[in-house]
Amino acid sequence: MNRTLRRTALLTLLALGTAGAQNYTGPKVQLSFLHGFTGPDRPVMESLVKRFNDTHPNIQVRAQAQPWATTWQQLPSLVASGRAPDVAVINEDQITGFVARGAVSPLTAAELRTAGIDKARFFGPLFATADYQGQSYGVPISSVAYVMFYNKDLMRKVGLDPNKPPRTRAEFLQIAQRCTVDKSGKNSTQAGFDPRNLDTWGVSLYNNWVGARAAYAAILQNGGSLIDAKQNAAFNSPQAVSAVQFLVDLVQKQRVARPNSTEEAELAAFSQGKVCMFPSGQWYLDRFETQKMNFGVTFMPRVGGTVRDAAWGGSSHLTLPRQRPGYDANKRAAALAFMSWLAQPAQNLTWTATGSLPTQGAVARNAKFETAAISGVFDRLNSVYATSGFPWVGQVMVPFDQAWEAAYLGKKPVAQALNDGVREANKQIEQARKNFQQ
């Protein structure tokens, strides 16, 4: 980006950063704001809230940070007793459940428009994470994704171009095969290769919930889904079985991934230059940068199928909890103004210092990211999908993760593992339906 374009982009961000919050002109109000940013991200959020308060004298926000789990436990009772916070941050795996329980109020199109919140500005699947039954319930302010780290030195060592990470299944498999080298120097495609005596290997797979997100991405890439139109578990469809089978075959047939491994073991192996590709959460970025590794970051290749790009994502959303009858309309208008301001590009750019991905294209295009490794995934941020949109996320994801582990470890054939997982998930969904408003 040249100097003129950088200046234009900066001016645009600054302009947008003050746009939506200028529309509250009512009497001075005080808002309570509940969030779970209790780690290194807390001072960043506190500085943003202070900046808002300093520039909006008729709205004063009192922020309270507490562990996410505490909020998930307390929010329903706070709503029921009429003591709900004016604004609350809810994560992607919880929001549909709170919506279905009636704990969060919808954001009407008129309210969004008046507050200057344009959903088209955000990455589509990210904004839709807080949608339910055609209605919006939240505005994204933080985002993470399942990405693929790759070791450039190791790729170069085996004769591959480190500046061309894989995008397709064929490219991915070729790199995995070339990087899987035994201690005699033979790779997995050569005669005499000994898979029991590896020096380096192609890709990391492992047995926890993070490892299962590779299977989630593969299923979406092949046109499958975790649930069907009736919101019952459906991760045993032909598309899902085919996609997960490819991943399991990387261990059992291709022998380019280690069997029976853990995230910790694969993380150590990648850090030590023993594995070419390490799919995982972007939250490991700081670790690899601190280690001064020569690595790249790319979007999860289309290993599951060719239907679409897809990767798992997590996110946090600003919401308006349901309030008691007679709630002050000025406070709701002020809360919307605060949400609008906090979600603007300038504030989102500040928030990326916490390790969050941009929530919108205007921020992703900022010159700050020109040489950043994480920018390797920015061209497909519109293809990051959370596990949301159905109230019983936990009832689906726990059996799904267990099914992945059983298939990856070879305890069950892929189809049986997924069938068993769906059967268990639907048992739990049947019970969960009784607890939700339909």
Image (spheres, rainbow, N blue to C red):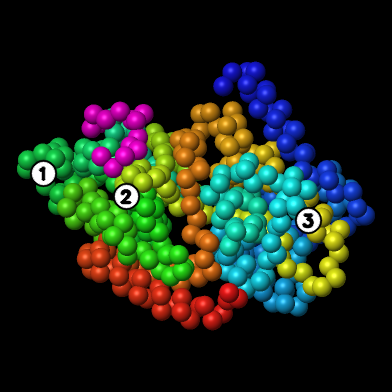
Q: Amino acid at mark 2?
A: Gly
Q: Quadrant of the C terminus?
A: bottom right
Q: Are circles 2 and 3 on residues that touch, CB within 8 Å?
A: no
Q: Is residue 167 magenta?
A: yes
Question: In x, y percent, where is residue 235?
Answer: 36, 64
Q: Are circles 1 and 2 on residues that touch, CB within 8 Å?
A: no
Q: Is residue 140 visible?
A: yes
Return the disc, 2 or 3, that comes first in the chain's sequence: 2
Asked where in the image residue 76 lies, by quadrant, the reply is: bottom right
Q: Is residue 284 visible?
A: no
- 90 shown above or below 302: below
**Pointer 1 residue:** 193
The foreground one among 339 and 124 is 124
Task: Specify the farthest residue to the left.
Answer: 192
The foreground one among 76 and 54 is 76
Measure the C-alpha gap from mark 2 to mark 3.
Answer: 42 Å
**Badge 3, how many Cα within 10 Å: few under 14, some, many 20+?**
many
**Pointer 3 residue:** 335
Q: Secondary structure at mark 1?
A: loop
Return the disc, 3 or 1, that comes first in the chain's sequence: 1
Tally of marks: 3
Compared across the picture, whether 168 is left or right of 127 comes to left
Instruction: Please name the residue shown 32% across and 58% down the image.
Output: 240
**Pointer 2 residue:** 304
- 7 shown above or below 241: above
Instruction: Please name the residue shown 68% across and 24% down the image.
Output: 8
